[in-house]
Amino acid sequence: MAALLSSEGLGHLYNQGQPNEVAALVDVSVAIEAGEFVAVVGPNGSGKSTLAKHFNALLLPTSGRVLVGGIDTHDQARLWEVRRLAGMVFQNPDNQIVATTVEEDVAFGPENLGVAPAEIGERIEQALRWVGMLEYRRHAPHLLSGGQKQRVAIAGVLAMRPRCLILDEATAMLDPVGRDEVMGTAKRLNREEGLTVVHITHFMDEAAAADRVLVMDRGRIRLSGTPREVFSRPAELREVGLDLPPMTELADRLRQAGFDLPAGVTSVEEMVDLLCR
């Protein structure tokens, strides 16, 4: 079965042909299957957000190609189809909320797709229920917390019935409660609705909750694997400039102190279980 999202030899240059030309992506080939939850991590300037924008066709390849649901993003005639298949949520929810009430905001995307009014109402209710915001449907977005706003932004994307949700640093501006709300929503949509999730983040504990982690460094994919596989390589992660998830860091220090602990521990529950043994 073909991957839902894929890139083949993807390269992207900012300021192409100018003295300040920057290679943001270099020969990136990756495939993301339907139903996966993939976290993409890397230091600032590593290319992770640039990669995300290619999966939504906000950027087009300088070299290579990107396929979304089998559609080449260079096909301008199918641009909106690509963006409906792969919906994107950005770092600042205030930049994505456009209406004066929650339900009007969620309706914005389907209305622009020409969806029938009766179906729009159904989509609003379903999307808000999915993100746990149905009771706020008539609230003004500016009165909501950061986490609630971001869940409304996610609902707005879900109302367009995408096959993939791309979170581009969507938790970066939130407090811990808001981060938990958004991550809980993303994991539930992936687990219960089968929605593919690509989560660009600099929080290693969020990456540890994914099915697969991609580590980017200077425009290339440096590591790829399950969280356990990736976080079992602390020296390489530190070389890239990344921290370890808190439990992985603790296990690494305890191992250096003589405790017999495996590499790649990522959760509090696993750590408690290992120590109690």
Image (cartoon, grey):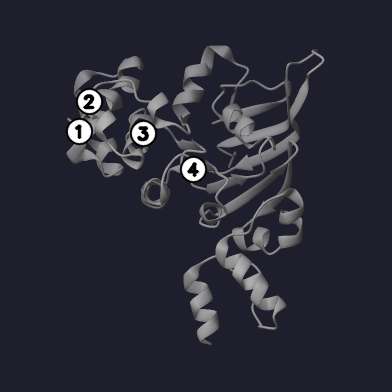
Please name the amino acid that badge 2 sits on.
Answer: Thr
Q: Quadrant of the N terminus?
A: top right
The mark lying in front, picked from 4 and 2, is 2
Percent position of residue 92, x then y: 44, 31
Q: Which mark is residue 197?
A: 4
Percent position of residue 98, x then y: 33, 20
In space, the residues marked 2 and 1 are separated at their CA atoms by: 7 Å
In space, the residues marked 3 and 1 are separated at their CA atoms by: 15 Å
Q: Residues within 10 Å of mark 2 (few under 14, many from 20)?
A: some
Q: Which mark is residue 158?
A: 3
Q: Residues within 10 Å of mark 3 (few under 14, many from 20)?
A: many
What is the quadrant of residue 63 in the picture? top right
Count how many numbered circles sit on residues in the image: 4
Q: Which mark is residue 137?
A: 1
Kind of element beneath mark 2: loop
Q: Are marks 2 and 1 in contact (CB under 8 Å)?
A: yes
What is the quadrant of residue 261 in the picture? bottom right
Q: Is residue 176 visible?
A: yes
Q: Earlier in the sequence, mark 1 or mark 4?
A: 1
